């Protein structure tokens, strides 16, 4: 029975009844979640479904709480389902549980959760990445075949990389964000974590498309995302981002070079590309994302829902004390940075300047995509780091997003695909980026690489199995 | 960019965040370090680029439609009475 959880979703659904599939997931979660802490809530009465799926706990569901891993939303339950959830349910999905995250999706390690860190299935002393670390750990550990996450600066791709699975950030506007708790509205997208590229392509087909409840969702027609999976890469043009390559060392560099050789072996044309401002992405990101977050998170005021301070005696104190008690340190840091960047006297020097550099970056990417079908980089500059290693140094944590944040700033789709393992046995990952709404091509290239390497087949030995 | 405790206090007030003195000191030091990194953006020539978004956000037609049920809203409210959110007195102190 556990075998079915080793299979990709698109194969497992042929092998087992919907009831058996969901029950297998619930049993696996029951066995392993205590050590991984990937799930914050589990739907023990999950309905049968041909797609058992986990959902990051910042996407609202009526049948389970939505906490955003924050004390301020500890008891919150949404009166409505997110549009992506409603579309999944309409196609027979069963929401088996809600997964851990960095509070309000702010972080790269899933350590900034009010409910404790998630552990990496490959090594429980290490982080799974973040902020969708609960979702990617759950898929990597074979507890569920797929999970939804959310992306603001790499929050699906980076943890997918550190957990050794596939992670997609679609084009800005491809998936409705109705019901995704807002962090940075010019960047946020729902993302998908799966074992294989095919699973990812099929799930995107279910949840993509315009939604009247999200005016930023695109009216661009939904593509047949799995149509070209077998088409190979012969003659396709891949650009290696020169400025990213310059920052790589050791095993990550060697792994990336090996991936390039695989693409060339399939007849791809691989040459150097240039995106001169790519090194500024993290600096732009931490102004733009935090400025938008400071506005979006003003809704958590202790009045309409969420935690309210018991000791507050005035309205102003309700706001300040509820927020002071309810938000964790990383969320406060980001609200402070964002408020500063938008405050009188600093707006031009910080927010406006960051937006102008962002426009320049967008222009540079558009230029690069005139010569190339894809741009490639490693997904992350390093493999999974030890729990606690970066919690006292926010800046070094932020720099983990150096290769992923550009796609969010520019609005393009990008996918992380497992590319092997380092000497410590930790997963490494290759990132493909393509131009707006080119998801179908992205899946084609990623599927070729996956077919040639098959790294997805290797599963972690879980702590609960080692004993 | 250097942020001192007084500047951190000013920003915390703007953001409606209660922070005690040690938290303000810690925040000031962390913000200084992060903003110093962000100051690299000053080196980049952005001539010809403006701050507007790539595309404008389209707006839906302004037709009334059903909203969330009042009882469902009340279920999440910290304090609720007779169809209203209850808050401390706003005018006239305590």
Image (cartoon, rainbow, N blue to C red):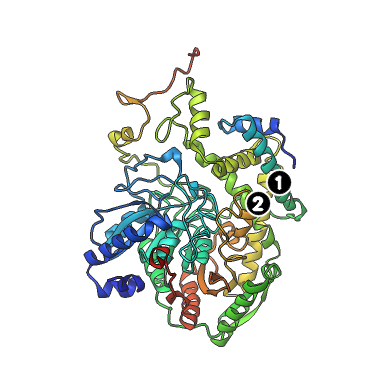
Provide the secondary structure element on which disc 2 rests: helix
- CA separation, marks 1 and 2? 8 Å
The image quadrant of residue A405 is bottom right
Quarter of the image with the N terminus of chain A in it: bottom left
The image quadrant of residue A176 is bottom left
Provide the secondary structure element on which disc 1 rests: helix
Q: Chain of mark 2?
A: A
Residue positioned 30% across, 70% down in the render: A2
Quarter of the image with the C terminus of chain A in it: bottom left
Q: Residues within 10 Å of mark 1 (few under 14, many from 20)?
A: some
Where is residue A292? Give x, y as percent: 56, 44
Residue closest to the eye, A38 or A107: A38
Residue positioned 70% across, 39% down in the render: A346
Establish if A51 lies above or below B64. below
Q: Residue furthest top?
A: B92
The numbered dot on residue A395 is 2
The numbered dot on residue B33 is 1
Where is residue A248? Give x, y as percent: 67, 69
Q: Are marks 1 and 2 in contact (CB under 8 Å)?
A: yes
Residue positioned 65% across, 36% down in the render: A343
Residue positioned 26% across, 75% down in the render: A15
Establish if A148 lies above or below B21. below
Q: Are marks 1 and 2 on the same chain?
A: no
- Residue B44 in view, yes or no: yes
Where is residue A218? Give x, y as percent: 45, 58
């Amino acid at each position: 029975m556990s075998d079915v959880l080793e299979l990709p979703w698109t194969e497992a659904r042929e092998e087992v009844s919907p009831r058996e599939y969901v029950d297998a997931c619930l049993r696996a979660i029951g066995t392993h979640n205590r050590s991984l802490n990937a799930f914050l809530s589990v739907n023990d009465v999950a309905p049968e479904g041909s797609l058992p799926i986990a959902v990051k706990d910042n996407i609202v569901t009526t049948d389970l709480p939505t906490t955003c891993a924050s004390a301020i939303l500890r008891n919150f339950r949404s009166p409505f389902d997110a549009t992506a959830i409603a579309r999944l349910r309409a196609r027979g999905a069963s929401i088996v549980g809600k997964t851990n995250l960095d509070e309000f999706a702010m972080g790269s390690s899933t350590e900034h959760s009010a409910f404790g860190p998630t552990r990496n299935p490959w090594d429980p002393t290490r982080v799974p990445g973040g902020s969708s670390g609960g979702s990617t750990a759950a898929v990597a550990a074979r507890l569920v075949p797929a999970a939804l996450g959310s992306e603001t600066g790499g929050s699906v791709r980076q943890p997918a990389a550190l957990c050794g699975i596939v992670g997609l950030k679609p084009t800005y506007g491809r998936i409705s964000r109705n019901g995704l708790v807002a962090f940075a509205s010019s960047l946020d997208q729902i993302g998908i974590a799966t074992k294989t590229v095919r699973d990812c392509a099929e799930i995107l087909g279910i949840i993509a498309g315009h939604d009247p409840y999200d005016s930023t969702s695109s009216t661009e027609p939904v593509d047949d995302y799995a149509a070209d999976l077998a088409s190979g890469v012969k003659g396709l043009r891949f650009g290696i981002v020169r400025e990213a390559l310059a920052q790589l060392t050791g095993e990550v560099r060697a792994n990336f070079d090996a991936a390039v050789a695989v693409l060339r072996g399939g007849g791809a044309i691989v040459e150097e590309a240039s995106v001169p401002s790519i090194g500024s992405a993290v600096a732009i990101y931490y102004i733009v994302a935090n400025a938008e977050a400071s506005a979006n998170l003003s809704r958590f005021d202790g009045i309409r829902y969420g935690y309210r301070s018991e000791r507050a005696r005035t309205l102003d104190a309700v706001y300040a004390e509820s927020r002071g008690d309810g938000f964790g340190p990383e969320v406060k840091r980001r609200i402070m940075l964002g408020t500063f960047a938008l405050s009188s006297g600093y707006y031009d020097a910080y927010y406006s300047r960051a937006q102008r550099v962002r426009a320049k970056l967008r222009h540079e990417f558009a230029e690069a995509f005139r010569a190339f079908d894809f741009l490639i980089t490693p997904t992350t500059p390093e493999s999974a780091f030890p729990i606690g290693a970066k919690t006292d140094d926010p800046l070094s944590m932020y720099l983990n997003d150096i290769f992923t944040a550009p796609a969010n700033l520019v609005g393009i789709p990008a996918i992380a695909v497992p590319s092997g393992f380092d000497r410590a046995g930790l997963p490494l990952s290759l990132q493909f980026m393509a131009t707006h709404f080119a998801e179908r091509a992205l899946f084609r290239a990623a599927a070729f690489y996956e077919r040639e390497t098959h790294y997805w087949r290797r599963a972690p030995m879980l702590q609960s199995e080692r004993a | 960019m250097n942020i001192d405790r007084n500047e951190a206090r000013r920003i915390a007030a703007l953001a409606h965040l209660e922070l005690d003195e040690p938290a303000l000191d810690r925040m000031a030091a962390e913000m200084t370090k992060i903003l110093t990194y962000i100051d690299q953006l000053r080196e980049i020539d952005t001539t010809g680029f403006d701050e507007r978004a790539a595309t404008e956000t389209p707006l839906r037609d302004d037709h009334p439609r059903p909203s969330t049920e009042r009882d469902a809203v009340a279920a999440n409210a910290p304090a609720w009475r007779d169809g209203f959110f209850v808050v401390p007195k706003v005018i006239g102190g305590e």
